[in-house]
Image (tube, helix red, strand yellow):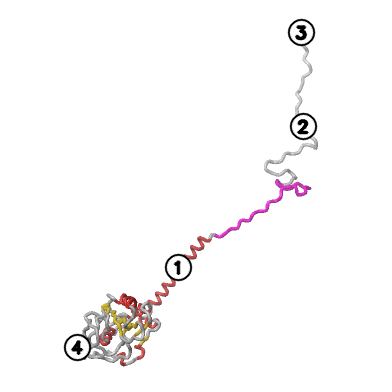
Amino acid sequence: MSMSTPGPERNPSTVKVDKTSGQGKPPAGGAKPAAKAGGAKPGGTKPGAAKPGAKGKGRKPVTPVKVSGGRSWGPIAMVGAVVLVAVGIIGFGAYAAVQGGKSWEDKAADIKGIVNYRAQKNPQIDARDHKDGPQTYVTNPPVGGAHNPVWQNCMGDVYTEPIANEHAVHSLEHGAVWVTYKQGLPADQVAELADKVKGKDYLLMSPVANLDKNVALQAWGYQLKVDNANDPRIDDFIKDLRLNATMEPGAACSGGNTTTGPVTAASNGTSMNK
């Protein structure tokens, strides 16, 4: 067996990818370094920017949209409402405190149209003598003066006929408010007045002949005349003067005369029954 003589040793040639093209030749223009991931090419422009020398062919810059930060009016309105309520409560409390600190005389003076006959110091009105028989009075209806020894029952009594002035004035001395109305006043107005009086102690009500206003209210030394039974001053008068205007604190309103008509000349001073 013959043996061949080994030839010269062959070394495989190596190809550098970054130096040659696929044919083993360097690419034209030389190799360019690869761009860094996520960044701009060295010496180049930022991504998205127009290339140098390009005439308007690059991407136009995007104008940022400004978002208006609108106010939330719901919470603001709620806070405003709470503030208003708080101010109202505080204001009412202050008003109530001031009103609560007033005397009943001051409250009475605040009623528009009220007449304070006590301030006049008229002896005929200020007199408190007990006398039998008919008496003459300064005002119609009377607000004070000499009167019958027997008072008119004033436990929320509603009289449908005129009562004796002499008995009614005695009721005023005890602290009652006497609600009177012109004879012939419409029934609905009479009913409205009656609702204010019925069943309430130290109140009484009756019609009066020749009254110059539709409604007149009397307490001892005070009077208020109005045109309508709906007038809110009626309630104010009753609230502020009932019991407060008494000349005999603690005097009763029950057990009085319950008849209607003028007094007789009899010594007992009782009214004529009708």
Q: Which amino acid, by three-letter code, is at mark 2?
A: Ser
Q: Mark 1 points at which residue?
A: 86
Helix, strand or loop at mark 1: helix
Please tell me whether mark 2 sits on a helix, a strand or a loop: loop
Q: Earlier in the sequence, mark 3 or mark 2?
A: 3
Give the magenta part as a residue range: 46-71
Q: Check if mark 3's residue and mark 4's residue have beta carbons within 8 Å.
A: no
x and y, in percent, of residue 55 in the image: 77, 49
Q: Name the residue under label 3.
A: 2
Residue 191 found in image quarter: bottom left
The x, y position of residue 103, in whole percent, is 36, 81
Pointer 4 local density, CA inside 10 Å: few below 14, some 14–19, many at least 20: some
Which residue is label 2 attached to? Answer: 21
52 falls in the magenta region: yes
Which label belongs to residue 107?
A: none
Q: Label 3: few (<14), some or many (≥20) within 10 Å? A: few
Number of labels in the image equals: 4
What separation in Å lies between label 3 and label 1 (alpha carbons)? Answer: 123 Å
Q: In this view, does 21 lie above or below 108?
A: above
> Disc 4 marks which amino acid?
Asn
Q: Which marked residue is nearer to the observer: mark 1 or mark 2? A: 1
Q: How crowded is mark 1: few (under 14 residues within 10 Å), some or many (20 or more)?
A: few
Residue beneath disc 4: 268
Q: How crowded is mark 2: few (under 14 residues within 10 Å), some or many (20 or more)?
A: some
Q: What main secondary structure does the magenta stretch of the protein show?
A: loop
Between discs 3 and 1, the one toward the N terminus: 3
Amino acid on which the number 1 mark rests in the picture? Ala
